[in-house]
Image: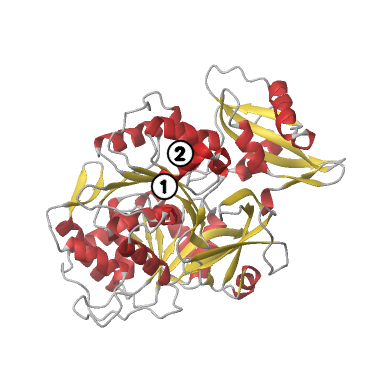
Amino acid sequence: MIVDAQDTSARRTYVDRILEHWYEDEGAEALVQGTRRLTRGEARRQLFRLGHALRGQGLAPGDGVGLFLANRVDSVLVQLAVHLIGCRVVFLPPEPGPGELAALVEQSRARAVVTDPLFAGRAADAAGRSVHAPVLLGLGPCEQRCPDLLSLAAECPATRPEGVPAPGPDEAVTVLYTGGTLGRPKLASHTHRLYETVLDLVDDGPRDSRSAFFPAMDPATDRVLTATLLTHGSGHLTSIQALVTGSALVVLPEFEAGAALAALREERITTTMFVPPMLYALLDHPECVPGVLPALRRVVVGGAACSPSRLRQAVEVFGPVISQGYGQSEALGIAAFGAEELASEGARRPELWRSCGRAIADTEIEIRAEDSTAALPVRAVGEVCVRGDTVMLGYYEDPARTAEVLHDGWLRTGDIGYLDADGHLYLVDRAKDIIVTGSTSDNVYSRVLEDFLLTLPGVRNAAALGVPDEEFGEAVQVFLATAAGADVVPESVGAAVTAELGELYTPRRTVLLDELPTTKVGKVDKKALRAAWTSGALGASS
């Protein structure tokens, strides 16, 4: 994927940009994880060694390399090394079960799988089921006795691998897992255009608030914390954004509110990204008070819908530093709301706290009805459709499902929302999360209900589900994570919902919990909630 840095006629890629920084001021800090701190020079040399070590396993340009990695500095470097030698990155996140993980490795046609020792058993099982027989490499010693990539790299030269062709215009260079049916994963594949978009926005600077998804940064002062998983789009983009600007990247091994707060404070973090449950947990920490993080200048909130009341609380605690971003694996950047605009315009137009902003630069958004290519008028609710360079090439090795969502460059996102007259996008639900209930089978938008529930005293987090109902097909059921000592009465919750949103939204049951289950990336896990409720693991409803 990367050509020689001296060949100025060839396309410069994002790894070239990173290396330009890593050749300058070699003693400056580049990568940090706890007590491990790599300078730019050390990071560059280790990157080259890893590239040679991967090549030594027979990998050639265009080959897929599965990355089943935890949040570590070495994980960042391995991902860069795969692109450095022209191979395709296949992110393997930790949440799929054994069968789904094996199907993911198989469908991605991975020639090798690099695993963190923590996941080595699962990685070995998945690789062993693949007819492509990928080589298994450990990022450190593993019980499976597979080759240790770090040990192999230690014996390799610290010079840049040569002879790597530039990627083709429609060549998949990065593949992200994005769900699917059992045994048939959907793998969103992206070309080099995704990274060129990042570089263009960095080079051009923040033209307006819609560049908040990739904000301008100063390598002399900015320090970026990656708290979400590096194998998900949010963690990947956060790390790339830091590195292409020459900023120091601090990697949080796993999220816990106290540890995150300590890292933000001790590492003088200026920029980070959280999914909503992470932000909520941070806000609920007793040490999270106004003025605790004076260095913090920007927090991007994305990955899932965020409660307007919690956003306002975050601004009260951290100041006007909260940006909203909206994207998905199929389109890693769609809309954004800059911190300054959100704080100032939100004071004048409170409804904007429910918006995820306007289309980022060079991206178009339309709202369409089902099975229609015509745009709906302002404020009409329909499916969010998007076109731009952050949109995927397609689902890897899956033309049928690609054709279902991509047409003439437009992606049907599966999210339901509307646009206002100024182009601000408002999401009301995922298509699959809409609850159809009532005597006339009307739509209950779980996002609308959850946002309201989070305004109630004592409610820390909320999830709304549709459960089977003989009379209406589905009934509304809500699950609330409540604060310690809070006196939340289920009947009062139902009455408040009815008064504010109407009888259609009134929950049939309200279940109080200490915590809501979350996925590895920090989103509320509605599948786990539904399974736990169906099995009776959550006990009697309230």
Quarter of the image where the C terminus is located = top right
Q: Mark on residue 295?
A: none
Q: Position of residue 289 (x, y in %)?
A: 37, 26
Taking the image as shown, residue 37 lies to the left or right of residue 370, namely left
Q: Secondary structure at mark 1?
A: loop
Query: Which residue is located at x 27 percent, y 58 percent?
Result: 245
Q: Which residue lies under the disc numbered 2?
A: 278
Is 159 located above or below residue 382 in the figure? Answer: below
Is 88 located above or below residue 222 in the figure? Answer: below
Taking the image as shown, residue 375 lies to the left or right of residue 455, namely right
Query: Which residue is located at x 55 percent, y 46 percent?
Result: 355
Q: Is residue 41 visible?
A: yes
Whole-number angstrom distance, CA of label 1 to CA of label 2: 9 Å
User: Which amino acid lies under the numbered mark 1 shown in the image of this protein?
Assistant: Thr
Mark 1 or mark 2: which comes first in sequence?
A: 1
Quarter of the image where the N terminus is located = bottom left
Is 309 located above or below residue 328 in the figure? Answer: above
Is 260 located above or below residue 82 in the figure? Answer: above
Q: Position of residue 510 (x, y in %)?
A: 69, 29
Q: Which residue lies under the disc numbered 1?
A: 228
Query: Which residue is located at x 27 percent, y 38 percent?
Result: 295
Query: Which residue is located at x 62 percent, y 43 percent?
Result: 526
